[in-house]
Image (cartoon, rainbow, N blue to C red):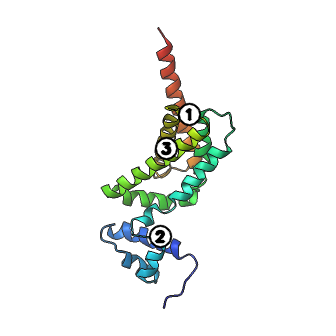
Amino acid sequence: MVRWEPGTRERLQAAALELFTERGFEQTTAADIAAAVGVSERTFFRHFPDKREVLFDGQSRLVEAFLAGVADAPADAPALDVVAAALHSGAGFFPDDRRSWARLRRGVIEQHPALLERERHKMAELAGIIRAALVARGVAEPAATLAAESGTTVFTIAFGQWIAEGEHRSLDELQTRVLADLRSLTASDAGRAARP
């Protein structure tokens, strides 16, 4: 009988990512992952419902981080400032020591359309949750949806930059820059629209 060891979940994740990278996602089984860590396949399934979830574990904690930022924003903050607070809080979920893992994870996901679709679905869920939190704060539609969707777009773009080879800036810094670009773009467009 295999005894429980601390860190089993993390070791399964590390082994899975290594195997997915070396062999391919489709060629790697839950049994392979379990064997690489020295646990039973049953132990794997105690931690993850399937091998796909190894790559998407942590979504609930990411959502919690974003919602903490929404909750911490001043009550009178405009919607985009609330989103900026959510982005700042969410960036804490990705310290620099997770960057290499995130790069490998993205490489695996980008090779499989079903995994890419799952990733997009997770971002859509996050946008919906942020939208609902904005509405609860009194932000009217369509501003709540525009702000939430813009926030997840900023996150997606900045995250792609953060995992790029040679990048050393923090995710928080990159998100701040991308959000500033968005604000500049919308301000320019608003200025043009106001001209006769």
The tag on residue 117 is: none
Depth-wise, is mark 3 or mark 2 nearer the camera?
A: 3
Residue 44, located in which quarter of the rendered image?
Answer: bottom left
Report how far apart the C-alphas of labels 3 and 2 lie in the structure.
Answer: 25 Å
Residue drawn where x is 55% and y is 83% of the image: 4
User: Please, is residue 150 above or below residue 98 in the view?
Assistant: above
User: Please, is residue 15 above or below residue 142 in the view?
Assistant: below
Q: Earlier in the sequence, mark 3 or mark 2?
A: 2
Label 1: which secondary element: helix
Task: Name the spot of residue 103 as percent of width and height, x first.
Answer: 45, 57
Hey, what amino acid is under mark 3? Thr
Label 3: which secondary element: helix
User: Please, is residue 20 above or below residue 38 in the view?
Assistant: above
Residue drawn where x is 47% and y is 74% of the image: 12
Label 2: which secondary element: helix
Task: Name the spot of residue 60 as percent of width and height, x first.
Answer: 53, 58
Residue drawn where x is 48% and y is 73% of the image: 47
Look at mark 3 in the image and give the residue it sits on.
152
Task: Name the spot of residue 162 as percent of width and height, x first.
Answer: 50, 49
Residue drawn where x is 61% and y is 53% of the image: 92
Look at mark 1 in the image and give the residue it sits on.
180
Q: Is residue 91 left or right of residue 42?
A: right
Look at mark 2 in the image and give the residue it sits on.
13
Task: Name the spot of residue 188 as percent of width and height, x first.
Answer: 50, 22
